[in-house]
Image (spheres, helix red, strand yellow):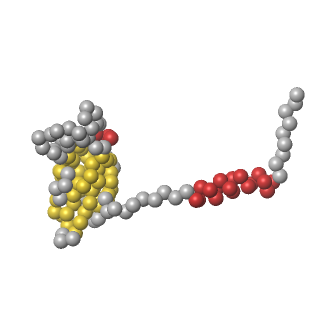
Amino acid sequence: MPLSIRRVPWPAALALPALAGLCASCITIRTVDDGVARARLGETTQAGPITVSPEQLVEDSRCPAGVACVRAGTVRVTVRIDNGPVELALARPLAMAGGALALVEVYPLPRDRVRRYPDEYRFGFRWTRDGR
């Protein structure tokens, strides 16, 4: 049995790609501007007037959920700020550029008996003006 090829009229052949283009423009990805600049190790982000590049995870001693810990622990990360290395600790702002830069979030959250590798981490930084 020979294979038959049915020709599609020229305007109909353009309808499918045009329809796909219209549908693609309907998809919207929304992000929330919460004032937190996020980056992984080796990436660069802008927190207010400060350019921040996380370079090395120094410590992650946060207590996992559901585990009784003597103290809560912290996260410390070395970051490059305007060509100089600085160490930031979670929720401990550092005064600079007429304001303060703080490490405000770290993901992933700690889990009991789960080893995390440095390339899995994502850090959130926020710069605020003094007095605000």
Residue closest to the eye, 46 or 6: 6
Q: Quadrant of the C terminus?
A: bottom left
Instruction: Pick out the residue farthest to the left.
Output: 70
Instruction: Pick out the residue farthest to the bottom.
Output: 131
Residue 44 point in image, percent of width and height? 32, 53
Residue 20 point in image, percent of width and height? 65, 53
Write the residue at 20% across / 51% down: 90
Write the residue at 83% across / 52% down: 9
Position of 73 compared to 32: left or right?
left
Q: How many marks?
A: 0
Instruction: Pick out the residue farthest to the right.
Output: 1
Residue 1: name its quadrant. Answer: top right
Write the residue at 19% across / 63% down: 100
Asked whether residue 85 is in view, the answer is no
Residue closest to the eye, 32 or 117: 32
Whether residue 132 is situated above or below residue 115 in the rendered picture? below
Asked whether residue 7 is in view, the answer is yes
Residue 11 point in image, percent of width and height? 79, 56
Residue 52: name its quadrant. Answer: bottom left
Write the residue at 27% across / 38% down: 111
Position of 120 compared to 86: left or right?
right
Residue closest to the eye, 52 or 3: 3
Residue 74 point in image, percent of width and height? 17, 46
